[in-house]
Amino acid sequence: MEITLIRHGEPEYELKGRAKAKEISDVINNYDLSGIKDKPSVTVIESVSNIRAVVCSDLRRSLDSASALGFEVIHDSKPLFREVSTPHFKSGEFSMSIDNWAVFLRVSSLFGFSRNGESLLMARRRAKKAALELVQLAKDEKSVLLVGHGFINYFIAKELLKMNWVGPSKPGGGYWGYGTYKYDAI
């Protein structure tokens, strides 16, 4: 059995500029509605072409990426496989660059901040559930591809490794980056 975790292609929506605290919700929503603006390399397409079952998050960039990889049939698409939801504020005039907001809010989630999003603990729990679902699907289909997102793929990979799956400690960080995990029954 094997499970491949791949990150989506580069989103059309660029996380640039400045935003006030009250505007971060709109930035996140626009990013989540974004499709992709690039295509995977031939090497990436060939590496996943024989996979039997494909699952995605329900976000457009994930679904568009599965299509760009050449998959016409998606076995399942659901919020369980979404990127870790960035906690954020819905009010406030404080302004800084979107890059700084991203770092500040992600670091805050490490310390339990989850307002309007997920804390690190919540994301890890969801990743465990996602990994168990992928393992069950791999038992049925033998090979599974998750077209997912950077952080959630990383947490799912950690769960697979805990369950005696063998693969890289990180499934690939850049757009179209991937890692393949095989089951080791020892």
Image (tube, rainbow, N blue to C red):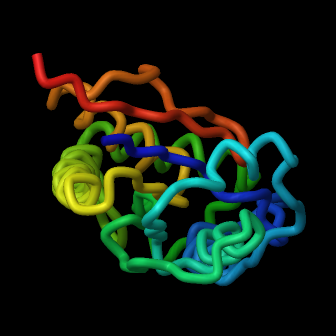
Q: Is residue 129 above or below residue 157?
A: below
Q: Is residue 173 visible?
A: yes
Q: Is residue 27 visible?
A: no
Q: Nearer the viewer, residue 27 or 170?
A: 170
Q: Residue at x 13, y 24 (%)?
A: 185
| Left or right, 180 with reference to 131 | right
Residue 66: x and y in percent read 64, 69
In-image side of 131 versus 173 (left or right): left
- Quadrant location of the N terminus? top left
- The location of residue 69, given as percent across then percent down, is 72, 63
- At 52% from the left and 43% from the top, the residue drawn is 104
Query: Which quarter of the image is occupied by the C terminus?
Result: top left
At 84% from the left and 70% from the top, the residue drawn is 12
Question: Looking at the image, which residue is at 39% across and 33% down?
Answer: 181
Q: Position of residue 165 (x, y in %)?
A: 26, 28
Relative side of 56 to 27, left or right: left
Residues 74 and 151: in front is 74
Residue 133, image x, y percentages: 21, 60
